[in-house]
Structures are given as structure tokens and as C-alpha cells.
Image (spheres, rainbow, N blue to C red):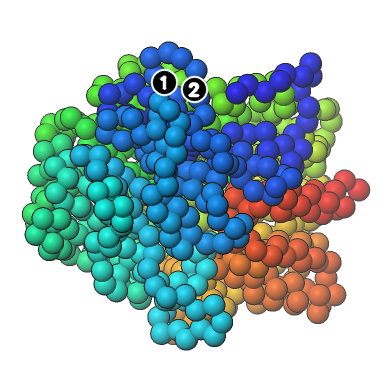
Amino acid sequence: MAYGLSMKPEPVRPEDFTQYSLLSEPSVSLKGDAVAITVYKANLDANEYEGNVWLVPLGGGVPRKLTSSGKDGAPKLSPDGKDVVFTSKRGIKKGTKGNGLYIVNVKSGEVKFLLRRKRAIESPAWFPDGRRILFISAVGKAQDDVKTIKRINVWFNDKGFIYNVRRHAFIFDFATGKAKQVTKGEFDVDKAAISHSGTKVAFTASTDDVRPYLTDVFMLDLKGGGTTKLTGHDMEISSVAWSPDDCQLVFLGHRRTLGSVTHEHLWVIDASGGTPTQLDHIDRSKTNSLNSDVRKGGLNAEPKWVGGNIFFLVNDHGAVHVYALDPTRNEVRQLVGGDRSVEAFEVNGDRLFFTSMESTKLPDLYVYDGRIKKVTRFNEGIDRTLALHEPERFSFKASDGERIDGWVIRPAGKGKVPTILYIHGGPKTAFGCAYLHEFQVLAAKGYAVLYVNPRGSDSYTEKFADIRGHYAERDYLDLMEAVDYAASHFDFIDSKRIGVAGGSYGGYMTNWIVTQTNRFKAAVSDRSISNWWTFWGTSDIGPYFMKDQIGCDPWDDEETTMAKSPIRYVKNVKTPVMFVHSMEDYRCWMVEALQMFTALKYHGKETELVLFPGENHELSRGGKPKHRVLRLESYLRWFDLYLKK
């Protein structure tokens, strides 16, 4: 599992992400003697990610590969620990939708096929009796040619056209060898959890196409067959889990008191229904929203109720930790802290198993039993093979008195160097203690990388995150003041050679910045927003996201709509701008880059447009390996042209 070590670490190249092992969330056996996990590796020649299921023994011994097709994922150990269920695209033509459900015997390694669906099988889970498997999959008739659309939800990023499909829960029964759909209707099931008795399934679902963010908890009685809605259609709910005695349910959610920037909290509700009770009052997000480009299906922030405690994540000042809450005493304590990003976790008895990464440490599996111990070494030796640059953390007081966190990565060598201000997406995400291959590549090529968490970012208070109706105001000032601070405090930053880049919201801010100031010598605007009017009508989240974030619908306030749109100020641009966009990005459709590029060309500005076919909003994090390399090479080419003169 360890890589061969060279005598001298080499500078990180765009293609070096193929050396990394990317981990799924762990699945721990009931006995606590083994963990099943998928290890993914990017294969540049095949232009895909190869995933295989591994079994990690916890009482000593060497991890071993259970599958070898390179097309496997989402493993879950059976209650008796003898088998692992997993999803796979083995035997399915490349580029074809859907996958299959399989099990592999832990002892013999024998793989058995269970079923295949034309729509993806997601989130498989064993029933306690080991005789059935719950999973979620989409249903609906595909229209490959002419599309007749009657729903407002036309498409969704990474899923394509969804106007004719719904997500529902299924149960595969080993006795019959068939899967039965157990939820039906014009709604979409997101998460599902099996009771410890195996007689009920709690699930979350969105029933409102106009306001899909409103989610409810439902109870499906497998014996009686009835379904009961437990909540009042007034919350955003992202997870659900059972109490040990099956009498209550815990979920993450909020009542949108500050719209979509409201932090999630832990809530408990009786399994028979009633009014949910909020359990915690921690003014921090309970999900991992740290930016990273070395993940492959490995994030899971769902709380777990084990014994007398509820275990959950807390996102705080650029780090993600694990906490435990005793609901009877209302006591909260931190279990796993430090400068780390906890990605996913499972609890078994008095031990907590989690995957984690750091700024210069790639993901691996750890166990906490009073102290933290590393269990796997899938990425052992990377820091000796590649010359990684440790970020230096800083904070400064903004002009209104708020403390702003930032980081700067210094490249090798002496003297002043060109610097890139990099802006994260969201805006309610954050930079922090998570590995970013892209930043290591930029540093290896001689660029200092400056990144900060301006107002609007996650990982702080709700007040800090709330820039609704005030985009490109305090957040813009925070970014400009961060550049001023860094240039005056880090003597290696060449203040005359600073570029700016960002993706999604970061792309929007890049567009905004180049229309408001000429201090940057070059810019790369990635998967951006340039026009809130077009975003409203083309984005998969447009109608409700814009109203929530900008504060209006376009026709009700045309002035605000355009005043907050960079396209209005395009004639001001003097900075050379490269636009990078995916052609199947339905979150920020490529029309956002195309119209900005066209306007700049029309006005004789220096600009370029790089479009990636077959890619979506996740290109930088999960796009085809060759496209990820080409994207980074495009960045380097553009910045080399304008920042290294």
C-alpha cells in the first residue's frame, strides 16, 4: 500500500493526484473487529476512477482487497460480519447509467450478483436480520429524444435531466432474489434508516417541487404498510437516525430562520410523531463543508445515536471535529479535535472510527478510544514522494473589527513571487484543514497561494455566514483587505504580480472583482455566475437560491438583479480573464461563462473560454482524470502568461 520512496521529493504536478488513495466512508462490523472501505485511485490511461473494496482487520493483520474489478463502491458489512454488500458498475458499458448490487464473502472472496438497475443504486444498508437490503434508486421513464417537461425541476447537477424521475426506497429480499419498491408518490426520498427491530423505516423526503429544500421525516411501517409524516413541512432536514430503543429519531436540520445560511442543529422527535425538540445550541455548522479535491464519495455528516450518546460533526474555524451529546443530561463534549477534517465516522461500543485528512496529509482511517490511533496507511509516503508545502495560517482584523482567518502557501525558492488569491465556492463553504491538490500544484509552479474565509463562509457563526442580500459588499472588502494584509506581512508576496481565481461563488466573485478593480494582473473564473437573471432560469437551484441569497425574483426587482450581476459592468474590465466551464454544469450553466466571454470579446478585452464536454459542476473535484489535468494546465498556462512576465 505504501508508495516507493524517492531520494528527493518531487514538485507536485497536475497529474500527481493519480498517486492518491481516496477513501469512502467506513463500515464497521457489529463485533468491531473489521472495517470495510472502498479505496479509489484515478487512472489517467483509462480516464476513470478505479474503486475496490478493502477489509481492514482491527485486531492486527494487514488490510486486504476484497474486490478487484475497479468499479466497486459503497460497501456495508453484514450484521454477522460474513459478507459485504456493495454497488458496482462491473459489466456495464462505460458512460452508461445505472449500476448493480453485489455481495462479497469476507472469508472466501466469492462475489455474488444480486440485481442491476438502469438508475443508480445508492446507500445500501442491511436489515438487522441480514436477509434484506434497503437502498434508494430513481424511478421513471427515460426520454432519450424529444423531452416533454411539466416539472420545474428540469435537471440537476451530476444527474442530468430529472423532470421525469423520482427517488424512492427499495428493499431487496434474499429469499425472493428481487427488489420491491416500498415508497411511492410524487416526492423524492433522500435518506432512509432502518429501525433496530427491522420493522420500520424512517426516511426524509422532499414533496414540494417549488421549494425542494423543505424536507419532512416520514415513517414507513413494514408490517402494516402505512406511511406517516412526522414533521410539519417547515424545516430543512438532511439526515435521520434511530434511538437505541427505536422510540425516538434524531435528525440534522433547521427552521430557516436565516434562510439557507441557518446552521443545522440536532433535533429529536418521537417515532410516533409530535413536535421536534432542538438538542444543541452550538453556533456552528454540523456538516463538513471544507473545500478539498481529494474526495470520492467519502463525506458523511449524519449523526449516530449509540448507547447514551448522539455523535455528530462540528465545523469550527476551518477544522471539522467529532462531538458527543448526552440527550438526558444535555451535556456536550468534544471527542476528536485538532487541525483536521473529519470526513466520515462510525461508532462501535466505546470506539469511534473515522476517516480524516489535514492540510498536507491525505485521507486515512483512524480510531478513537480515548486517544487517536491511525489504522490504515493507504497514503503512506506521499509526503516523501511529493514536495508538499505546508500552509501558514494567519488572521487579521477587518475594517469593521471582525477577525478573518486566512492561509498562505509559500513556494520553494527565495525572493518575491507571484501570488494567486483563490476564492472558495458556496458561499457557505470554507477553507481549512483539508488537502487541496490544486493549491499544491500552484505552489510547485512557483506561485504563492492566498486563501481566506471572508464573510459568507461556513465554519463560523450564523451572523458571519449571513450575506444574503449583500453579495459583493462585506465579502468583497474582506477579500481586498486580505490581499492588503498579506502583501504587507509576507515579504515573499510580489504585490505587483497578483492574480485571482475561484469557482462557483468564487467564480462569481472573480467576475465581480475584475469589474470593480484593476489591481489583479490575471484572473481565472471557474464555473461562475455572471448574470443573476439567467442564473435564475437555468440553474438547477436558481429560483429558490437567488430569492434567498440576492433577496428578489428578477422581475420584481430588475435593478437589484442587474446591480449584483458582473455582466452589467463588463466594460470596466481590464484584467485578462480566462473562463473555465463544464458543458453539463447544471448548477451554474455554461451560459454564465459564455455571455461574459462574448461581452469581453465584443469590447476588445483579453479573454479566453475553456469548455469541458461531459463534465459538470464537480469537474475540479471529480471530473474525468484527463480533464482535471487539462484544467490545471490551463490555469498554469494563463497565469504563467500574465504573472511571470
Instruction: Compute the Cα span from label 1 to label 2.
Output: 6 Å
Against 179, residue 242 (above or below) is above
Q: Which label sits on residue 558? A: none
Residue at image x 76%, y 52%? 630
Residue at image x 80%, y 42%? 418
Q: Number of labelled discs? A: 2
Specify the amino acid type for callout 1: Pro
Q: Quadrant of residue 84 in the image?
A: top left
Describe residue 155's horizontal placement relative to residue 172 as left or right. right
**How far across and how far down the image is residue 381, in percent?**
65, 21
Against 61, residue 110 (above or below) is below
Question: What secondary structure is found at the residue carrying circle 1?
Answer: strand
**How far across and how far down the image is residue 219, in percent?**
16, 57
467 vs 80, nearest the viewer: 80
Specify the amino acid type for callout 2: Pro
Q: Which label sits on residue 57? A: 1
Q: Most extreme residue toward the right, as rendered?
A: 645
Describe residue 265's horizontal placement relative to residue 381 as left or right. left
The answer to whether residue 557 is seen in the rendering is no
Q: Which residue is mark 2?
A: 63
Callout 2 environment at 10 Å: few (<14), some (14 to 19), or many (20+)?
Answer: some
The answer to whether residue 578 is seen in the rendering is yes
Q: Quadrant of residue 303 in the image?
A: top left
